[in-house]
Amino acid sequence: QVQLVESGGGLVQPGGSLTLSCAASGRIFRVNDMAWYRQAPGKERELVARIMSSGGTNYADSVKGRFTISRDNAKNTVYLQMNSLRPEDTAVYYCNVQAVPYTTLRKLEVWGQGTLVTVSS
């Protein structure tokens, strides 16, 4: 019903930048919250940033001031601009979207396949 395609992960040196993107497709009536989570090796998945349909945002304390989440509602796409990257930001990053498909008109939570971000010199 709703599919997510992530892109933008890769290897970057400490202090560098990366931008992740996640596009939602399908017969979508409405997209509500969009978010990025991450999971480092041996750790639980954690919320990195969330952006509501109103444009309001919240961030994990560990990324405040370094990461910026944004969305393009016309494209049903969410972005995560990551600056001043640190080795501890290394993780698989997952897109999470709350959408309402035309087929059911009920809220649906969808996860992306994940994209690996490695911060290393």
Image (cartoon, rainbow, N blue to C red):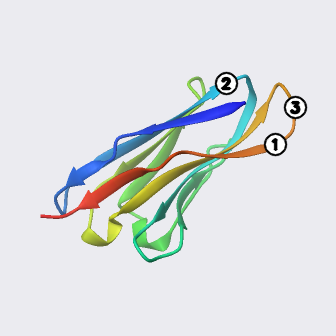
Give the amino acid type for the residue marked by disc 1 in the picture: Lys
Q: Residue 98 carries which label?
A: none
For the point 67% across and 24% down, the residue is 26
Across and down, in percent, residue 22 comes to 49, 38
- Frontmost of labels 1 and 2 is 2
The residue where tag 3 is placed is 104
Across and down, in percent, residue 109 comes to 72, 47
Q: Is 55 above or below relative to 38?
A: above
CB atoms of marks 3 and 1 within 8 Å: no
Q: Is 58 above or below relative to 43?
A: above
Q: Distance between the residues labelled 3 and 1?
A: 8 Å
Of the pair 60 and 65, the residue shown nearer to us: 60
Q: Is 63 above or below relative to 98?
A: below
How many callouts does the rendering have?
3
Q: In which quarter of the image is the C terminus?
A: bottom left
Does residue 17 appear anywhere in the picture? no
The residue where tag 2 is placed is 26
Q: How far apart are marks 2 and 3 (CA)?
A: 13 Å
Across and down, in percent, residue 19 comes to 34, 44
Q: How far apart are marks 1 and 2 (CA)?
A: 14 Å
As drawn, is 30 to the left or to the right of 24?
A: right
Across and down, in percent, residue 39 comes to 47, 66
Mark earlier in primary sequence (2, 3): 2
Of the pair 36 and 113, the residue shown nearer to us: 113
In the picture as drawn, the residue positioned furthest to the left comes out as 121
Q: Is 71 above or below relative to 89?
A: above
For the point 73% across and 22% down, the residue is 27
* Secondary structure state at the residue bearing disc 1: loop
CB atoms of marks 1 and 2 within 8 Å: no
